Amino acid sequence: MIADAHCDVLAPDSEFDAGSLEKRGVSLMGCAIFEGRTPALGFIQTQLEIYKTLPLHEGKRRILTLEGMSVVYRWPALFEEIMETGLRCAAPVWNGENRFGGGADCRIGLTDFGKRSVRELEKRGVSVDLAHMCSETFRDTMKILRSRPLISHTDCARLCPHRRNLTDEQIRAIIASDGFIGVTGYPPFLGGVSAAAHIRHICELGGERNVGFGSDIGMTDGAVGPAFYEEATAELIGSGATAEQIERIGYENFRRFLDDGTD
Ligand SMILES: [Zn+2]
């Protein structure tokens, strides 16, 4: 079975919808509402509507996630509607700066508003997604986080020093907090090596129970397609991964993260 923590399947111009990925074997899917570079009310409403109306295939599980949270202060009523629909994970920032803190393009920490919002998300049972944070906001968020940290779509800076990737120190901190790291197949983050190589690197740092897929499929101009899962799995098997390890990385680690760490 396959779990994917980050799928861009809700935007009207996405290359894949949730149903087509389910047909291709994705059993547990994080469906992201993406705010966009310049958040627009209609764009967010459309994605929420698509999430609400897409029929779920039998035996499959979907969760609603947010990528960028300025909707909280721009359109509070819409945020409440997203909460009621079942928001499960939320990334406060995208690449730029907002009232919460700094994204990957910035050098600022988590603001006081950001700190209060992290607490509020935890209180309401929403996992905080540290994907897209700059290192300062990441550091400040980790300092106050009481729940398990999530990085829904990223890769390893050791293998590709991209500003969106995690350093070994950050990866170790996530593992120490029993969090989850979703590895993406987006070529600029992979840096010329495979997603399986990034997964193996996280395993070498001790993250065999904390790593899985966070493909970013849907808005990558065809760079990440459904073959991503099969190719990564085949390479891991080829490099000696056991059936149990494949099950953990491919599905169980993200399932366990969502279900409060229970096996
Ligand atoms: Zn993203």
Image (cartoon, rainbow, N blue to C red):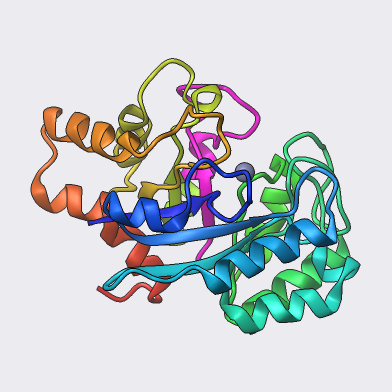
Left or right, 240 with reference to 90 = left
At a point 59% along the width and 65% down the height, the residue shown is: 50
Q: Is residue 242 visible in this depiction of the protein?
A: yes
Q: Quadrant of the C terminus?
A: bottom left
Left or right, 212 with reference to 55 = left
Residue 30: within the magenta?
no
Position of residue 220 measured from the top left corner of the image (x, y, whole percent): 55, 33
Left or right, 99 with reference to 253 = right
Position of residue 212 measured from the top left corner of the image (x, y, whole percent): 35, 49
Q: Using the image as rendered, state which of residue 160 and residue 223 is in the foreground.
A: 223
What secondary structure is the magenta-colored segment mainly?
Answer: loop
Q: Is residue 147 visible in this depiction of the protein?
A: no
- For the record, the magenta segment spans 148-171
Position of residue 183 measured from the top left corner of the image (x, y, whole percent): 43, 41
At a point 28% along the width and 57% down the height, the residue shown is: 251
Answer with the quarter of the image where residue 247 lies. bottom left
Answer with the quadrant where ligand 1 appears in the image: top right
Tell me: residue 231, above or below residue 58: above
Tell me: residue 219, above or below residue 116: above
